[in-house]
Image: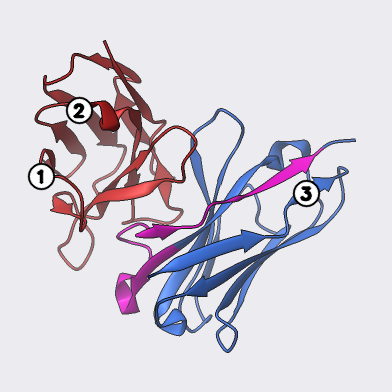
Chain colours: A red, B blue
Amino acid sequence: DVVMTQSPLSLPVTLGQPASISCRSSQSLVYSDGNTYLNWFQQRPGQSPRRLIYKVSNRDSGVPDRFSGSGSGTDFTLKISRVEAEDVAVYYCMQGSHWPRTFGQGTKLEIK
Amino acid sequence: DVQLAESGGGLVQPGGSLRLSCAASGFSFSSYAMSWVRQAPGKGLEWVSAMSGSGGIIYYADSVKGRFTISRDNSKNTLFLQMNSLRVEDTAIYYCAKGGSGSTGTKVGFDCWGQGTLVTISS
């Protein structure tokens, strides 16, 4: 199975400051069609998960542009340019290039 | 509006069975891959099973293979998860999640999730 490793697991951030979450996969996520299927999800306290970004860098509709995704191969990053109170959540990366689908352990973002 | 609504969770003894349902609305159900994803109390997300829109392609996590069966009724816009030989470690919130259409399937993750249904396995 492809192991997804996130860091840090806990991320205290001051309001208005940037935040960055790393996600590394144990195998390349480049699929045979040339696409890289690395997706990011946000789960706010007490809520269901919500997809933020798909295929490395494509933001979902309604996701603020302060969220951005980047990376390639086995190394990926989710960045929040300026953290707001509503960003308090656990963030998960998930790979869709291999079976079984696998998630990272989650990164808990909190306000410092 | 795209909506997913799970039902069927509850308290079951180890070794027992449960059938979860997920009623979908607001999209062309038969065109989209669907999945079940679970979350044990206080833990992260674990993908459980996926089925293509037509139902012809199915995958399971090793942890549930041989015990769980995913199915769908496209005439009723409903996804199912039959869970047999349940174990304490199957205790979790089970989410129904919508994948992509066609060959994209679940590669792009899930753009809509239900509210989840809690399954508790305990004697």
Q: Chain of mark 2?
A: A
Based on the displayed image, in which of its 4 quarters is residue A11 positioned? top left
The image position of residue B39, as x and y in percent, is 56, 40
Residue hosting label 2: A84
Based on the displayed image, in which of its 4 quarters is residue A86 positioned? top left
Q: Where does the N terminus of chain B fall, quadrant-wise?
A: bottom left
Please, is residue A34 above or below residue A26 in the view? below
Residue hosting label 1: A65
Picture residue at 20% right of the left edge, 58% below the top: A61
| In magenta segment, residue B103 | yes
Residue type, label 2: Glu
- Residue at the bottom extreme of this rendering: B75
- Observer-nearest of B106 and B6: B6
Residue type, label 3: Gly
* Span of residues in magenta: B98-121
Are the numbered discs 1 and 2 placed on the same chain, yes or no? yes
The image position of residue A101, as x and y in percent, is 42, 52
Picture residue at 22% right of the left edge, 65% below the top: A32
